[in-house]
Amino acid sequence: MILIIDFGSQYNQLIARRVREQHVYCQIGPPDIELSRIRSLAPQGIILSGGPASIYQKASPKIDPRVFSLQIPILGICYGMQYMIDSLGGMVERTTKREYGLAMLNILEPSGIFSGVSPQTPCWMSHGDVTAKLPEGFQITASTENTAIAAAENLKRRLFALQFHPEVAHTPEGKRMLRNFLFRICGCARNWTMKSFIGKAVGEIREEVGGKGVILGLSGGVDSSVTAALLDRAVGRQLTCIFVDNGLLRKGEREQVKSLFKDYLKLNMRIVNAGGRFLERLQGLVDPERKRKAIGKTFIKVFEEEARRLKGVEYLAQGTLYPDLIESRSAFGGPSAVIKSHHNVGGLPKKMNLMLIEPLKHLFKDEVRLLGRELGLPDDMVYRHPFPGPGLAVRIVGEVTPKRLSMVREADSILIEEIKKGGYYGKLWQSFAILLPLRTVGIMGDKRTYEHAVVVRAVTSLDAMTADWARISHSLLARISNRIINEVKGVNRVVYDISSKPPSTIEWE
């Protein structure tokens, strides 16, 4: 296990992904994590992430400096390097020649972190401070034209420092450097697999739940479906899946979910028709955060009501994933910026009558898909495009009304049908339609129209941390546009979103 300390870097999630790709488990923790907690986690190595702060600022994040005396290998990246150097008696200062972007790294010590790395290799820099003086026992291991101490190490204490970012794709040999840290220095084993995860998770769920009942909100999406399959393996008939028809679902969603889970997989399942209730709570709401939180609170209330109808239920299960935690409030309360509230984590009331169980909360989406296959779920479910917990409500910019829901639902159905026909569905991370709160002038049947605009969004991604807009063929886009305008009453314009994440998010709200 590797512990990653989140100093606020936009890349800390990417560090975790790079570690997991090597079949090594890792967790992200905050700088104020207690030393006793680190000891109890017993990590084989610690990675200190980068961050936007300067080490000499009063409010800069700091971990207990005694961590460097735990005899655990530590790798400091960017700000993590600067904190290591400063804490151990070195000197960090503001540089007159800042480095942002690509730089050529000259390897001075081709061992340890740099074992097998080319003598000269590109790296990605992003810093305005530099190490001016190394602590006792450290030596320089790499440099660039503008940064004399681009990397350093204390082999005796197994402390390593990199001013650049090895986790990003712009550092082509960064993966090799991280592998060297994981296996040559920390002695990690490649035992993080979904098969091993199932065994560990099933045992933990059984120990926590005991003989008590569990309810799960089943949407038919990948996250809740895999959560249901995992809980079914762990507690069997103690699990009751509740499908809440919140009126914000895709076309035919309710029928598909019932057919698969209740009729085919034979899970305990109850269907709750609560569409009117959700729409009532959404009436007059325009701000996306208020919409998400209203949906989340209503969702929990519905669950608590259903739980009271069942005997022995004390747990509410959710398919929360690691990116949900990171984007909503930063995992473990770390300093990363809040991007948006997620339905699973941002809309929860402060006091619940059910205990929460989130068996997937440390997994990324691609890992969840692998887990689903390991649990025997069909590929058409496992590789289904993500669908947000708040449903179509976050794909309607502005107020949610029955008429606007109908428009975006029909547009989305046409889009998915054509994406599948065109052979793009399996190549995309996500594709969907968004309804804008504006009208545009058009011409239909030689008459002036003043109707709504629909945005088509399609992206490629590995884990939703970053995403790029999909280069879909113009002929397919033309068919999608033509069908939506002709078949969805109230729409006279279709546009295609060519924004990447960052700076945009995948969903519009």
Image: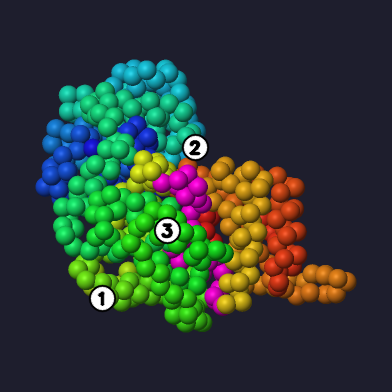
Q: Is residue 90 above or below residue 247?
A: above
Residue drawn at (35%, 58%) of the image: 267
- Is residue 399 inside the magenta stretch? yes
Label 3 Cα crowd, 10 Å radius (few <14 / some 14-19 / many 20+): few
Q: Are marks 2 and 3 in contact (CB under 8 Å)?
A: no
| Residue assigned mark 2 | 101
The amino acid marked with disc number 2 is Gly
Tell me, for residue 498, which label it has, or none. Answer: none
Mark 3 residue element: helix
Q: Is residue 176 above or below residue 276?
A: above
Alpha carbon separation for disc pair 2 and 1: 57 Å
Which of discs 2 and 3 lies nearer the camera? The answer is 3
Mark 1 residue element: helix
Question: Could you say which quadrant of the image residue 433 lies in?
Answer: bottom right
Which of discs 2 and 1 lies nearer the camera? The answer is 1
| Residue assigned mark 3 | 263
Residue drawn at (50%, 50%) of the image: 384
Which of discs 1 and 3 lies nearer the camera? The answer is 3
Residue drawn at (29%, 53%) of the image: 232
> Which residue occupies the foreground of this view, 394 or 222?
222
Write the start and end of the magenta stretch as one range. 377-401
What x and y, as percent, mark residue 349?
30, 72
| Residue assigned mark 1 | 308
